[in-house]
Image (cartoon, rainbow, N blue to C red):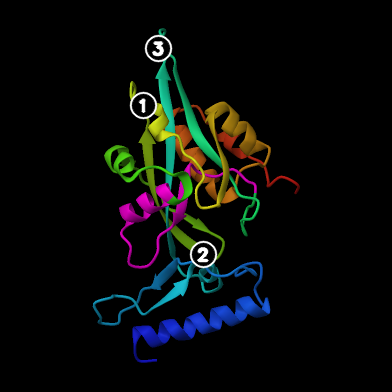
């Protein structure tokens, strides 16, 4: 195990055997692995600066930090009396997804593959999940800041927004399912998003992102409302 490629091959073989035997099916699951390998960073002195790469879904078994990109696409309008209203494009995850099938999610989200820059990962997900053109995303995307930690799997999320410019062709910003991971998109006001959150219809792992987005853009989501956010539907 004296090289990056040998260690990566060994971890790949181990994780695939766990997947095929169903040993950790709640984590690795029965489905084929995707293409999102994650670097396990170490002190090895190589140009790669990490010890080996590993399938994303298996990272929770080892407590390895993973990296993701999330983006909200929203429209903002101001009435004659100065009242601001915001609507966000919210997708429903495909029923065939291994995790959180049929739940609401962020406008666009995905993992950061090993070796791919953060912005390029976000742009890739925008096309794959929402059919958003490269030029539109690069021109209007705005980075935000957020870090979250989850169950046995600390995760760093790189967060972005796209505000649909006033007076622009709104059709260019309408997300459309492409790669099968999303069933549909809805343009929802914050009030309806929070109602669905309380009812347990949103993926729990994105509650903090919804909360941050609503607080930053709308400023009316208080502690009591956050405490009322529900468990997953059916629990």
* Image position, residue 137 (x, y; %): 33, 42
Residue 211 appears in the picture as rendered? yes
Q: Real-space Cα distance between discs 3 and 1?
A: 23 Å
Mark 1 and mark 2: span between their CA atoms? 40 Å
- In the rendered view, tell whether residue 115 sits above or below residue 10: above
x and y, in percent, of residue 75 in the image: 42, 27
Q: Disc 3 on helix, strand or loop?
A: loop
How dense is the environment of label 3, judged by Cα within 10 Å: few (below 14), some, or many (20 and up)? Answer: few
Whether residue 228 is visible, yes or no, is: no
Q: Residue at x 49, y 28 (%)?
A: 87
- Circle 3/circle 1 CB separation < 8 Å: no
Residue at (38%, 39%) from the top-left corner? 161
The residues colored magenta run: 102-127
Q: Which residue is mark 2?
A: 153
Left or right: residue 33 versus residue 173 is right
Give above or below for 77 relative to 233: above
Give the class, few, some or many, for how many residues have Cα within 10 Å of label 1's Cα (few <14, many ≥20). few
Cβ atoms at labels 3 and 2 below 8 Å apart: no
Q: Nearer the viewer, residue 50 or 5?
A: 5
Name the outermost residue toward the bottom: 2
The numbered mark, 3 or 1, whose residue comes first in the sequence reads 3
Asked whether 114 falls inside the magenta stretch, the response is yes
Residue carrying label 1: 169
> Is residue 103 or residue 233 the one in the foreground?
103
Q: Is residue 129 rendered magenta in the image? A: no
Lower sequence index among marks 1 and 2: 2
Q: Position of residue 220 (x, y in %)?
A: 50, 27
* Residue that carries the numbered disc 3 in the rendered image: 82
**Left or right: where does residue 196 sit relative to residue 7?**
right
């Amino acid at each position: 195990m004296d090289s990056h490629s040998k260690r990566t091959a060994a971890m790949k073989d181990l994780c695939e055997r766990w997947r095929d035997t169903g040993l950790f099916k709640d984590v690795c699951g029965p489905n084929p692995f995707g293409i999102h390998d994650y670097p396990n960073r170490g002190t090895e002195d190589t140009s790669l600066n990490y010890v080996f790469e590993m399938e994303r879904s298996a990272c929770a078994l080892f407590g390895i930090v993973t990296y993701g990109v999330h983006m909200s696409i929203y429209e903002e309008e101001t009435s004659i009396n100065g009242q601001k209203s915001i609507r966000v494009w919210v997708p429903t995850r495909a029923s065939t997804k291994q995790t959180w099938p049929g739940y609401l999610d962020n406008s666009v989200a995905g993992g950061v593959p090993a070796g791919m820059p953060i912005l390029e990962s976000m742009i890739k997900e925008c096309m794959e999940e929402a059919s958003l053109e490269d030029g539109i995303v690069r021109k209007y995307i705005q980075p935000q800041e957020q870090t979250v930690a989850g169950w046995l799997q600390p995760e760093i999320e790189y967060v972005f927004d796209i505000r649909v410019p006033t007076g622009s062709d709104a059709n260019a910003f309408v997300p459309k399912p492409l790669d099968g991971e999303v069933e549909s998109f809805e343009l929802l006001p914050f009030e309806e998003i929070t109602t669905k959150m309380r009812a347990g219809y949103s993926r729990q792992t994105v509650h903090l992102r919804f909360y941050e987005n609503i607080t930053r853009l709308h400023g009316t989501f208080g502690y009591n409302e956050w405490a009322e956010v529900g468990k997953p539907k059916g629990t």
